[in-house]
Amino acid sequence: MKLHIIRHGYTAATEKHLYCGKTDLPLSESGTREIRNLKIHGIYPGAEAFITSGMQRAEMTLDLIYGSVPRTALSGFAEYDFGDFEMRSYEELKEIPEYIDWMLDETGEIFCPGGESRLGNSERVMDTFSTLLKNLEKSKPDAALICHGGTIAVIMDNLFGGERNFYEWQPSPGRGYTITFEKDGSHTYQTI
């Protein structure tokens, strides 16, 4: 079974380097053009089952890549909840003590004010991922999950931890990974 995990296209927030988690933004014009261009170049693999986080940017990306196909929206794959840091840039936040504490946190236990902790985010995403895999195991279709950069980094770091720094797992908008799950329980990946 193969699972293609693809990051949504560019939004106004990604273009401005803003923390964007729970804000439900659509793709920007350039994000739409980029996804269409990548599709023309044939980078996206086929799939039989389709899953999104339910957010506009993921839904729009799925439509651009695969068309108006039936899909399942799983909110557990939503991006990190940045709370009070939402829609703000590093430059705006870099001297705020709570932001500094959160950035320097090596335990993953510090919450963004009004948001979630890295550990809480990882648990939410991986609980949803585990449930998805159990459901896919029943019929073993190749599936496409369209979600968010932070969500993808959590999944890849949990499955292939130690190969890269956590943040290096976050693909560029419109890109991602194909994970192949073997019958013996092993799994490998390729970059999309």
Image (cartoon, rainbow, N blue to C red):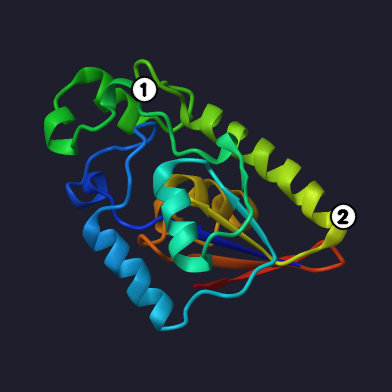
- Residue 139 is drawn in which quadrant? bottom right
The residue at the point 47 percent across, 78 percent down is 43
In the image, which disc is placed on residue 138?
A: 2
| Helix, strand or loop under label 2 | helix
- In front: mark 2 or mark 1? 2
Relative to 34, does residue 157 appear above or below in the rendering?
Answer: above
Residue at x 87%, y 66% (from the top left corner) = 184
Residue at 41% x, 58% y is: 168
Foreground residue, 192 or 108? 192
Q: Nearer the viewer, residue 141 or 84?
A: 141
Q: Amino acid at mark 1?
A: Cys
Across and down, in percent, residue 76 comes to 58, 35
Measured Cα–Cα span from mark 2 to mark 1: 38 Å
164 or 132, nearer to the observer: 132
In the rendered image, the vertical position of residue 110 relative to residue 55, given as above or below: above
For the residue labelled by badge 1, is the local secondary structure a helix, a strand or a loop? Answer: loop
Query: Pointer 1: what residue?
Result: 112
Q: Is residue 99 above or below residue 51?
A: above
Is 33 on the left-hand or right-hand side of 5?
Answer: left
Specify whether residue 148 is in view.
no
Q: Residue furthest top?
A: 114
Of labels 2 and 1, earlier in sequence is 1
Please state, as top left, top right, bottom left or bottom right, where the N terminus lies in the image: bottom right
